[in-house]
Image (cartoon, rainbow, N blue to C red):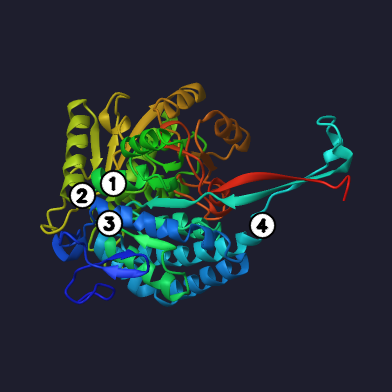
Amino acid sequence: MIAGIPAGGKGSLFIGGEWRPPSGGKYRPVIDPSTGRPIGEAPLASAEEARAAVDAAAAVEESWGNHPGHDRARILRAAADRIRADRETLARLISHEVGKPITDARVEADRAAYVFQLAAEEIRHLGGESYPADAFERPAGNEHRFLFSVRDPIGVVVAIGPFNFPLNLLCHKLAPALAAGNPVVAKPTSAAPFTALRLAEHLSAAGLPAGVLNVVIGPGGSVGDTLVEHPRTRLITFTGSTEVGKGIAEKAGRHAKRVILEMGGMDPFVVLDDAPLASTVEAAARGVFSYSGQVCTASKRFLVAEGVADKFAAALAERARTLRVGPAGEDSTEVGPLIDAGAVDRMESLVADARDRSAKVLAGGARPKDRPEGTYYLPTVLDELPEDARVVREEPFGPIAPILRFSTIEDAVRIANSTPYGLQAAVYTKDIAKGFSLAKRIRAGGVHLNDPTNLRWDALPFGGIRESGLGREGLRYAMEEMTEVKLISVNYANS
């Protein structure tokens, strides 16, 4: 039995502080991508149970919103301590549920604890501001007024998490919502229920009152839509595909609800002709092959200056061939499996399309022959791609590095901005002036000079533009999104 999975292998829903099996008795197998074998069963909630979770959160909306900030901080710090103490179990759950290499899964657990610690610290800084009333000519009488603003909790927050960071990205939704005084209904991915449910155990044990956090798992078409459209939910924070995110925004918009959407990307990695080859190639390999490319900020298009393209392509292909592909639970594994068989099929389809368009496969391009079990795909490097190839127009979400060559800076900017996305970008060069110029012209939520695209600071603003997202994560910035500004005026003329 895997630590963190209940005896019998069946998870439970968490509603109103109580653990309960799904009323309809429905479960879904949770498959270990490294082996293709089930490790347990995810409980599937009904629409009625989703409504019950919202009702439980709404019942404590006022009490949690008025809960002293210092005590909210104490609970979040206690949760951070519990996550740190449980690091190995949480990392092993992540590794088994979604196939993340164990070394990366441990980093994810560390970051999750840090997110709760940061949220606790930010409570002290979540405030409004005062205004000099007498600086305003109208309305009359401002010389006898005091003006200030406060931030009120927005209300019940719905947190919909992805499979690729089942712990840390869920924490990036729960921690700021709870810190800001909002109760939460979380809908983690059914691919990784046990990681989320163990997190709920830690928050409950840390002192979170019943009903402040509720966890339901189930399909988006019933459970997800119920949460988004329930009249008592006020904000939906979502990480996932652009298609699903736009559907959530449409449903939420009909009810004037706020959304924070972290969606897809086609993050460009730009290599200028003066970039140091060895370090750039190593960063490129991290950017595209970490967690098999299943990261929204993974480097998905390599835009390389013609003068260095041959050397870069050959070196990246050689690096790809040296990476160890293996089971996620082994410390030596550098590239683990993809999340499921459908993801592998998609890699094969994208590479086949590239081949049909005369692209060169310099490395990979197939399933590994020595891994008959599990859902593996070799780290792949494609060169001489046309711009209309599917792999440079559609987010692959897999270990594929497509190389596009450019002749001028203008061409690099055009290609970088040629998709509907704008999450993150990277530029490698020794010429900082050129780097700054590109950083200004590339349309994205974040641009990193001489660092890969998949860099993120948990405390700083993170998010995309256009079809990559709406709003910003990062503790303080998410907390601002999750609160309402209220202006208060005091007339002391006759006091």
In-front residue for pair 355/176? 176
Lower position in the chain sequence, tag 1 or tag 2: 2
Left or right? Give the position of 138 relative to 427.
Answer: right
Disc 4: which residue: 125
Disc 3: which residue: 49
> In the structure shown, which secondary structural element does the residue marked by tag 2 occupy?
loop
Disc 2: which residue: 377
Mark 2 residue type: Tyr
Disc 1: which residue: 399
Q: Which mark is residue 486?
A: none
Measured in 3D between alpha carbons, the distance from the residue under mark 3 to the one under mark 1, in whole angstroms, is 38 Å
Residue at the (42%, 36%) spot, across then down: 255
> In the structure shown, which secondary structural element does the residue marked by tag 1 occupy?
loop
Residue at the (42%, 72%) spot, across then down: 204
Q: Residue 23, how many percent across, how many down?
A: 19, 61
Measured in 3D between alpha carbons, the distance from the residue under mark 4 to the one under mark 3, in whole angstroms, is 36 Å
Mark 3 or mark 2, whichever is nearer to me? 3
Residue 383 visible in this rendered orientation of the protein: yes
> In the structure shown, which secondary structural element does the residue marked by tag 4 occupy?
helix
